[in-house]
Image: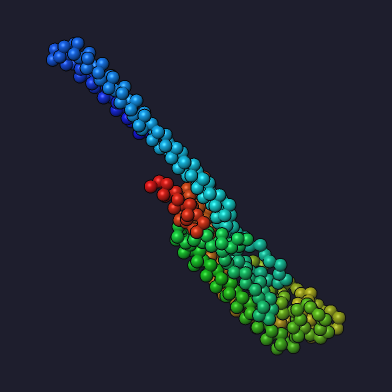
Amino acid sequence: MRRRSKIIIAILGLLGFITLTVLLAYCKVVSWNQAMSWLIGGLVIGVILFFLDRLLFGGQSAREKHKLEQKAAQRRKLEGYLNAHYENDLLPVIKAWLQPLVPPIDDSRQEYSLLSASAYYHPHGKSVISELSEPNHHRENIVKEVIEHLRTGYPEVWGKWISLKEAVNDHLGSVVQKWEKIEEDVKVIAEEQGLAGWDGKGTKPTTDYCSINHLVEATWNDPEYYRTQKRHSWDEYEIHPAGEGFQFGGTWAYSLRREVLEELKKRLTNESNKITEEKKNLEEERSNLESEGEVIKNSLKNIEEDYIRRHIEIRSSCPTCKKWLNELTELDA
């Protein structure tokens, strides 16, 4: 580019010299013979200067061109490193954020899911919470690098994520506490009715018993069931003779006396009524948290779309890509 500019300037200078010489001769300031001498002399000097420039500065132009080619090659290499880092490391983790949870192998009957987190009911205070958290990756440092990009490059998204994670995990904790309270109340009801607790494992009692697990699950789900069916879930099962006594709901409860099971149904109905408003509040909170999760998911999707379709680099840097970005900055200096 610099050499082209020098050639253009030389041509313009030569044209100006010729024009001025002809104009002086035409105006009879100088003779035509003198003007021709000037022109020939000017051409000779121009040729000499041209060859001197080639001799003295031609090598420098070649070196500059080579240097530019090296810079371009280095830029392509660094950009290739960055693109590979974005596509193979960062984007797969971003895509996995807030994806539906793959449930773990769990023998619980009661599951409560929220976004990519869940709680699983187990009796005797052994319920399990699979908390909302950042995606897993076989290379742990990759997740840390994605976090660094989000934290420094997209602070609004990261702030919303931190708040959502805390709120979701607190919500699941409240659900487990409610399960434990229902279980505690059901055990009291069973004890007051003279029903031994049985969880379906081991030898079934031969006298009055009830399945605490089934009754806790039925009580927890009953407010929704009653709202749609206009009757309680245990009303689906008639108390009927079984052996020397009576039972309902398969293995839900068994007693030698019908009135014990009738009273159990009434007590379960009272328990369901007690938690109806709390369940309503939990469902409203759950819906709001799911909506907040969708906002974050869309923001993460936009980051992916910006890179893939609009060729906008992922903002900020992490320990892996920082050195490449610094080198690119130095190349542009």
The relative height of residue 198 versus residue 147 in the rendered view (above or below) is below
Q: How many marks?
A: 0
Q: Where residue 191 sits: x, y (%)?
A: 71, 87
Residues 305 and 248: in front is 305
Coordinates of residue 103 in the picture (x, y in percent): 67, 65
Is residue 328 something that shows in the picture?
yes
Residue 149 horizontal/vertical position (percent): 49, 58
- The quarter of the picture where residue 223 lies is bottom right
Q: Is residue 214 left or right of residue 80?
A: right
Q: Quadrant of the N terminus?
A: top left
Residue visible at 81% across and 77% down in the picture: 240
Q: Quadrant of residue 204?
A: bottom right
Image color mode: rainbow
Residue at image x 84%, y 79%? 242
Q: Nearer the viewer, residue 220 or 85?
A: 85
Q: Quadrant of residue 105?
A: bottom right
